Amino acid sequence: MRIAADRKIVFANEKFAQMIGQPRESLFGSLTVDLVPHELRGLLEADFEELEQGDLRARLTSLRVHNGGAIPVLVLPMIEFESIGGDDIRFDVVIDLG
């Protein structure tokens, strides 16, 4: 998954879309905070702040799935490697732990 500086999804592969049960195209432009359960959104905001300071440690979290449930995942943030229109793009590897 690739995330822009405004925390919107700019790319997700088909496997990620299948994992959460959403059409891949529907993810583009979505805010990453919309992918996590409501009770984890504050933690995600704190994680983003740490990531912006260069903290690239793996994070355990959950993602909401199409049926209203959630699945445990491990997110491996990668160094910014690309720029689109002046915005840095961060790449995350998301591993389904379920």
Image (cartoon, rainbow, N blue to C red):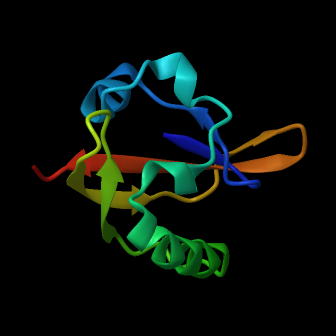
| Picture layout, residue 96 above or below residue 80 | above
Residue 2 in percent (x, y) is at: 56, 41
Q: Spot the residue most to the right.
A: 86
Residue 91 in percent (x, y) is at: 53, 48
Residue 15 in percent (x, y) is at: 30, 25
Q: Residue at x 41, y 71 (%)?
A: 40
Choose between 74 and 23: the one closer to the eye: 23
Q: Spot the residue most to the front.
A: 68
- Indicate the quadrant where residue 76 lies: bottom left
Q: How many marks?
A: 0
| Picture layout, residue 46 above or below residue 18 | below
Q: Is residue 90 left or right of residue 19?
A: right
Q: Residue at x 43, y 18 (%)?
A: 23
Q: Is residue 38 left or right of residue 29?
A: left
Q: Spot the residue most to the left.
A: 98
| Picture layout, residue 23 above or below residue 76 | above
Choose between 1 and 38: the one closer to the eye: 38
Q: Residue at x 46, y 49 (%)?
A: 35
Choose between 29 and 39: the one closer to the eye: 39
Choose between 10 and 66: the one closer to the eye: 66
Residue 96 in percent (x, y) is at: 20, 47
